[in-house]
């Protein structure tokens, strides 16, 4: 008698659950945080996706009279990518906070600083807006550093580096001065981490020697970043922001 094999269901691929995807996101982000001190892979991936979509759209040949359709599709894609970028940037900031907690970094006390509060806006790589406990906003210019302008090479990358470090986070500021634009100039700390110094160490900011002439720590951080060709130092002839501004 022929042997009757038990009925077996065909295997089906199962998509990863949202909980598993979130866990993978956090693990990957914490891993980058441990190695580099910030979390930037999300925004870098979105920039790559944006470029790939733009290249694919540009390579498609459509019949005459479809320009409005192409423009509508491009606008929809741009809106979708912008929405994804904003959502993931917030998640990226929360992941940085998780990493701080996992590493048992010291809790920041408001009494240690001249100003403290939550970062509610990042203007560029060296300027942010802080909202204090009285709901007063303070525009903060990071002391002793200068990052590429937004239209300058590495300007967007410098902004994203600052965003990854402090966006949505509670920070403290040791005030140094007030500049001619009315901004508070100071050194920013997040859970004891010197953000100004970190940006220079990672190669996303220049030591602003004119305003921090005797800051040996910033000078040394820049020398090391340049030697290691980190960040903007990947460029063989980077232009200092103050020189770029004078030319533009």
Image: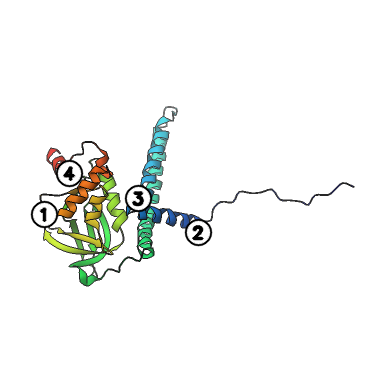
Between 84 and 63, which is closer to the camera in this rendering? 84
The mark closer to the camera, 2 or 1, is 1
Disc on the earlier residue, 3 or 2: 2
Residue 150 visible within the image: no
- Left or right, residue 104 beside residue 173: right
Q: Secondary structure at mark 3?
A: loop
Task: Provide the residue designation for mark 4.
Answer: 241
- C-alpha distance separating marks 2 and 4: 43 Å
Q: Secondary structure at mark 2?
A: helix
Task: Provide the residue designation for mark 3.
Answer: 40
Residue 229, horizontal then vertical, whole percent: 27, 42
* Mark sitting on residue 19: 2
Task: Provide the residue designation for mark 1.
Answer: 214
Q: Is residue 25 above or below residue 148?
A: below
Residue 171 visible within the image: yes
Q: Residue at x 22, y 55 (%)?
A: 197
Disc on the earlier residue, 2 or 4: 2
- C-alpha distance separating marks 4 and 3: 22 Å
- Left or right, residue 122 beside residue 29: left
């Amino acid at each position: 008698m022929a042997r009757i094999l038990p009925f077996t269901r065909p295997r089906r691929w199962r998509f990863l659950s949202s909980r598993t995807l979130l866990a993978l996101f956090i693990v990957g982000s914490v891993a980058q945080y441990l190695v580099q001190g910030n979390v930037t892979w999300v925004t870098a991936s979105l920039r790559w996706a944006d470029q790939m979509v733009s290249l694919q759209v540009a390579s498609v040949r459509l019949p005459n009279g479809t320009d409005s359709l192409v423009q509508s599709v491009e606008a929809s894609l741009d809106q979708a990518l912008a929405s994804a970028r904003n959502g993931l940037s917030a998640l990226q900031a929360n992941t940085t906070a998780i990493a701080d907690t996992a590493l048992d970094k010291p809790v920041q006390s408001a009494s240690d600083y001249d100003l403290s509060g939550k970062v509610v806006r990042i203007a560029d790589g060296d300027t942010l807006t802080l909202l204090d406990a009285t709901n007063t906003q303070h525009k903060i210019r990071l002391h002793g550093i200068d990052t590429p302008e937004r239209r300058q090479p590495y300007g967007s990358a410098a902004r994203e580096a600052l965003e990854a470090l402090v966006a949505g986070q509670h920070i403290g500021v040791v005030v140094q001065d007030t500049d001619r634009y009315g901004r508070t100039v100071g050194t920013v700390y997040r859970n004891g981490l010197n953000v100004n110094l970190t940006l220079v160490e990672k190669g996303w900011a220049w030591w602003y020697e004119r305003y921090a002439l005797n800051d040996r720590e910033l000078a040394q951080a820049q020398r090391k970043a340049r030697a290691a060709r980190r960040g903007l130092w990947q460029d063989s002839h980077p232009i200092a922001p103050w020189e770029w501004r004078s030319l533009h």
